[in-house]
Amino acid sequence: MTDPVLSIRNLSIDYVGAEEDFRAVKDVSFDIMPGEFFGLAGESGCGKSTIAFAISRLHRPPALILSGSQIRLAGRDVLALNEEELRSFRWREVAMVFQSAMNSLNPVLTIERQFFDVLRTHTGMSRAQARDRAAELLAMVDISPDRLFSYPHQCSGGMRQRIVIAICLALNPKLLIMDEPTTALDVVVQREILGRIDVLRQQLGFSVLFITHDLALMVQACDRIGIMLEGELVEVNAAQTIYHSPQHAYTRRLWGSMPKLSGQQIGASAAL
């Protein structure tokens, strides 16, 4: 039996307040297997991003991971890592693509410089070596190496997101976390980015944790999907099972809330 790349057990996270605490994640457990495309879906505020930040140890006060929680990535106890170990762990073991690429990229540095900063810090590459590696990584996400000397504002939203993905893959991480990576992008660009990620996943062998509230988009990309509701993981199943035969009432309500492109209209307009 293959060991999971990511194993989360009994994860609970509170946001500590002056008068009372709010439990954002409630006793969540799930695994992601090597090479798996795993989705985490649910409405805004259900705890998806809080879990993502906890995996990378990016959470800050007032967020507090409660005792008894376990996060293991490639066999390492993530919650036991010290600051120096975390510095090596991030990018090499796990990398994260955030929602807004413009906020992830430094607006006053060229794309080439931003690749160089990552590669020099973690591998000691020279500027020339880093430039060659950056050109190779851009080609992997279908961007011309000429863009190395562009600034982020000179690239489209879809290009910026693919550049962020390329930077995240620079050190061949075992897990790529994508937290709402296609929000604000049109549907064609969304499919292009997810399609490219899927190809790279199969080529390079990394696993993906894909977080979104867009269940329809997730079903097209993922192998398995977990459904979050008010901090709890209420259902985990194969993507096609989630689509054709959802088990939890909340999952069925999520599908029921999706707008239909055809069928009988309801509401006031139907009565006119």
Image (spheres, rainbow, N blue to C red):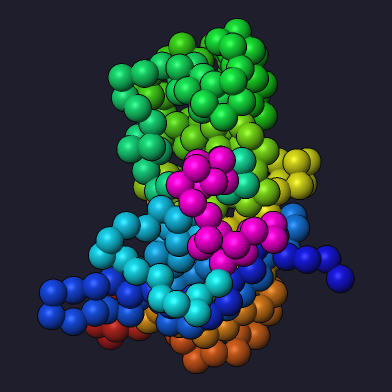
Can the viewer see residue 178? no
Horizontal side of 136 relative to 10 (left or right) equals right
Task: Name the residue at the top extreme.
Answer: 128
Who's the residue at 52% across and 85% down the image?
234
Range covered by the magenta-colored residues = 71-90
Q: Quadrant of the C terminus?
A: bottom left
- In the rendered image, the vertical position of residue 34 relative to residue 170, given as above or below: below
Q: Residue 1's quadrant in the figure?
A: bottom right
Residue 168 versus residue 75: which sits nearer the camera?
Answer: 75
Residue 139 versus residue 11: which sits nearer the camera?
Answer: 11
- In the rendered image, the vertical position of residue 77 relative to residue 139, given as above or below: below
Who's the residue at 73% across and 65% down the image?
4
Who's the residue at 53% across and 61% down the image?
80
Q: Is residue 219 magenta?
A: no
Can the viewer see residue 124? yes
Q: Is residue 75 magenta?
A: yes
Q: Tell how many labels.
A: 0
Who's the residue at 53% across and 67% down the image?
40
Q: Residue 101's quadrant in the figure?
A: top left
Q: Which percent across, then down, holds residue 82?
A: 49, 51
Residue 20 versus residue 153: which sits nearer the camera?
Answer: 20
Q: Which percent across, then down, holds residue 213?
A: 44, 66
Horizontal side of 72 relative to 229 (left or right) equals right
Task: Name the residue at the left extreme.
Answer: 19
Q: Which percent across, then down, holds residue 207?
A: 68, 54
- In the rendered image, the vertical position of residue 97 relative to residue 15, given as above or below: above
